[in-house]
Image: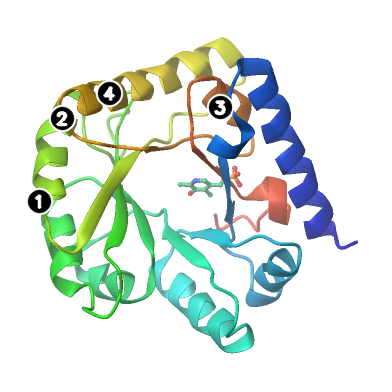
Amino acid sequence: MTTIEHNLQSQHLRIREACQRFGRDPASVQLLAVSKTFGPDAVAQAVAAGQRCFGENYVQEGVDKILSLRASHPDVALAWHCIGPLQANKTRPVAEHFDWVHTIDRLKIAQRLSDQRPAHLPPLQVCLQVNVDGGANKSGVAPDEVAALAQAVAQLPRLTLRGLMCIPEPTSDFEAAKSIFESARDVFDAANASGLSLDVLSMGMSDDLEAAVAAGSTIVRVGRGVFGSRPLKA
Ligand SMILES: *Cc1c(COP(=O)(O)O)cnc(C)c1O
C-alpha cells in the first residue's frame, strides 16, 4: 500500500468517526484532497487509491496538473476545485479548466467566471467564501453581505451557486473552532431560509476537520493529512 493510500484511509476513518460522534451521515461529508505543491505523480497515486476530487490553490499549477492527469488518465472523471484566492485577471483558465471554485468573494469575479465558462462544459459549481472570524487582512465576504452577493451570483447563467466556504484562523481549542464553524453554518441556514438552496459547506482542514464536521461541514479540504507535509512555500 502506498503512503498516500494509507493516508486516505486514515482520513476517511477520521471523517467516519467524527460523523458517528456528532450524529452525521458519513455519506454527507466529502473528502477533498488538496494537492497544492504536490506533483501529478502524487495525484495519480491518490487516484489509484480511489480519490476523485482534488483542490488546488494556484491557478497555473492547477491547470498544469489537470491537463497532465487528463492525459495520463483519460478514462477517469476527476473533479477539480479551485480553493485559492482568485484575481480578476486569472479567471479565464479557472473557468476553462476547473469544475468548482470555493473562493468567490465579489460579484465581479463571479461575472467573469460566468462569462468565460465555455458553452460545452456544465456550469461552474461555486461557493462564496465567508470571512467568519473577521480577520482584517483575510479574503472572504462579511457574513452580513452574504445574502446580497448570493442572490446576485445565483442569477449568473453559467454558474451554479452551491454554498459557502470558510478558512478560520487555526486554533487548537476544539470548542472555539466549532463555534466559529457554527457561525458559518448560521449564515448558510439564513441564506437557505431566505429562499436560496445551498447544499455545500466547505470547511475543515487537516487540523480541524472534526470541529467542522460537528458544525455541519459537507466538504473537508485535507492537504497534509493526505499528501504529507508541504515544502515551506505554502
Ligand atoms: C492548503 C489548504 C487546505 C489544506 O490544508 P491542510 O492543512 O494541508 O489540510 C485547505 N483549504 C485551503 C483553502 C488551503 O489553502
- What residue sits right under mark 2 in the picture? 195
The tag earlier along the polypeptide, 2 or 4, is 4
- Where does label 1 land, which residue? 155
Mark positioned earlier in the residue sequence (1 or 2): 1
What amino acid type is highlighted by mark number 4?
Val
Q: Residues within 10 Å of mark 1 (few under 14, many from 20)?
A: few
Residue at image coords 39%, 54%: 84
Residue 173 shows in the view: no
Mark 3: give few (<14), some (14-19) or many (20+) Cα within 10 Å. many
- Say whether disc 3 or disc 2 marks the residue closer to the N-terminus: 2
- Which colouring convention does the figure follow? rainbow
Residue indicated by mark 3: 213
Distance from Cα at disc 4 to Cα at disc 3: 16 Å
- Point out the tag, 4 or 3, that comes first from the N-terminus: 4
Mark 1 or mark 4, which is nearer to you?
1
Splitting the image into 4 quarters, where does residue 174 fall?
A: top right
Residue at 14% x, 31% y is: 147
- Give SS at disc 3: helix
Looking at the rendered structure, which numbered label has been put on residue 187? 4
